[in-house]
Amino acid sequence: MVSTKFFAIVAGVGPGTGRSVALRFSKSYPVVLLARRPESYNDVVAQINKAGGRAIGISADATDKSSLASAFEVIKEELGDLQLVAAIYNVRPNSRPSRKPFLQLNQEDLDVSLKGNVYVLPFLEMMFGSREFGPEGIHVAHAIIDGGIDVPDAAHSDRNDGTPDGKISPYANVVIHDISGDEHKYSLDSHGFGYVKHESKEKDFVDDEKIKAEYYPEVEQLLKDSTGASRVFIFDHTIRRATSDVRDIAGQLRGPARRVHIDQSYGAAEKRVKHHLPDEADELLKKRFQIINVWRPIKTILRDPLTLANAHSVPDSDLVPAKLIYPDREGETYAVKPNANHQWYFKYGQRPDEPLFIKCYDSVDDGRARRIPHTAFVDPAHENDPPRESIECLQQSDCIMIDRHQPLDCLSPPLLYTLPESCQQLKRGFSDCKRGMVDMRKRFRGNQPISTSAELEGGGGAAAKQLLGGGSGGSEVKPHKQLYAGKPVFDLPLKEGARGEVSGLGFDEKKKPGLRHEAE
Ligand SMILES: NC(=O)c1ccc[n+]([C@@H]2O[C@H](COP(=O)([O-])OP(=O)(O)OC[C@H]3O[C@@H](n4cnc5c(N)ncnc54)[C@H](OP(=O)(O)O)[C@@H]3O)[C@@H](O)[C@H]2O)c1
């Protein structure tokens, strides 16, 4: 609801911070946008008015008194009844600070930098002198942006061997549209994604071999039926699982991917065909081929849903190749530059019987959607729900990526001990959670904390082994105490070697040699 009593001014509107600030304020107030050239504010004025807000663009030089006075005349005419609630001075100086290494800066460089910002100084003075306005309800604040903002003309510095600078995204106002009920309007060719109805026999997604033997053929048929493909080759699958405990405590697990990306670059897509089907690649590459990611939730998704940007709203110039270096080959994905024109979609509460097709690549370039950026995002309504499950940590470990072991082998001793600590905590957290569900005492008392700071900070081999439930000795180690009303809840000594697993939870013992070995 836009205010009918107050308005805001943003002086210095351009594609970066000025635009984001204007969009943000326009949600609550009519806004006046100032820049010297209309092309700096025209787009955003149109966007705000189209969205039902109220914006007025005025060409004015915010460093020039008479120009500002004329601007206020226009404001009085247009918004005479309203009171000013906030004035944001976002003017970017014309001169850029020198990009020389710090110790090579000379007096001249410092002068240029200072002069570029000189008109901000009166505002700083005002800030310190502004207490006198306090009784009138006026507050002056100075926001320092201590880093580069990713605006089109902010070139990367060629320092650090050309490594791109980290930049702050100015786009704070991404709207993600829920397409529930309108799924039929979105398809692989029109937008780059599509939801289909399909119930799978596979429900658990824990056994890699079963997935390949039973789930792969199901997906193959589904893709043929949905896209008309004459042949389908499945080269990979990823299962994401995580427990909330682990992520909250370790704070370092990789859960759902929260970076806008495309799974394959154009070049990498062709290389994929050559890599997986070397004998047929030449023939296959003469015809149309697509790489499609079939994304099926294991449980209904409420927290960390997946959002996709309409392929046509993302120009190739927004794609940044990012290499993936494997021991035996090189892959390439695309990172995606932020852009206020990207159109984002998701489906609320996506269920396991509503798999999503994501087009990663289409060899045909005839106006159809060719590739679609996607990412997980935080839905504030479900921020504190249990998280999506993820074993990406495991999938990306050296144990799988470099040494090429099977996931189940990596989860069992001795390979288990080679996993990064975060993956080990994931495993323990998952086990504890399952045990807590069947152990009546735990149902009343709750699970023990997954780790203490000592464990996280490398509390030594014994702590690590206890954490994993591994080790071969029988020596007693002190359990970590969970306090309840100041008293330890768990007083039982834990045997080193006692695992966090219990039988009868649906694990196939034959496939868990580590477990069987330790039980013996
Ligand atoms: N970009 C960065 O990396 C970065 C980093 C740290 C801090 N900052 C600060 O953040 C603020 C916004 O920067 P931004 O890069 O995101 O820019 P922006 O908001 O994309 O654009 C700023 C706009 O200011 C307008 N402007 C410049 N001089 C003006 C004047 N005298 N009167 C009225 N308007 C004027 C320019 O449009 P016209 O040319 O049409 O007037 C320009 O489009 C600035 O204060 C900047 O110093 C930027």
Image (tube, rainbow, N blue to C red):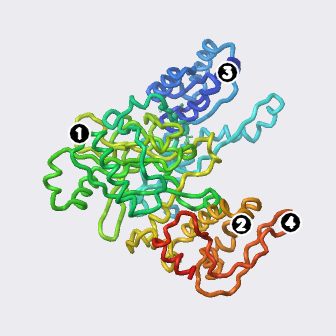
Nearer the observer: mark 2 or 1; the answer is: 2
Q: Between disc 2 and disc 3, whose residue precedes?
A: 3
Please state the horizontal and vertical placement of residue 127, each as a whole percent of the image: 72, 39
Which one is in front, 365 or 36?
365
**Quarter the C terminus occupies:** bottom right
Q: Quadrant of residue 501?
A: bottom right
Q: Which mark is residue 174?
A: none
Residue underneath mark 2: 448
Task: Kindly identify the amino acid type of the residue bearing the numbered disc 4.
Answer: Gly
Please state the horizontal and vertical placement of residue 251, each as a whole percent of the image: 61, 60
Q: Between disc 1 and disc 4, whose residue precedes?
A: 1
Nearer the observer: mark 2 or 3; the answer is: 2
For residue 69, above or below residue 105: above
Residue underneath mark 3: 3
Mark 1 surroundings: few (<14), some (14-19) or many (≥20) residues within 10 A? few
Q: Calculate the distance from the C-alpha at mark 2 to the C-alpha at mark 1.
A: 55 Å
Please state the horizontal and vertical placement of residue 411, each as a whole percent of the image: 50, 71
Task: Kindly identify the amino acid type of the residue bearing the numbered disc 1.
Answer: Asp
Please state the horizontal and vertical placement of residue 17, each as a whole percent of the image: 54, 38
Q: Calculate the distance from the C-alpha at mark 4 to the C-alpha at mark 2.
A: 15 Å
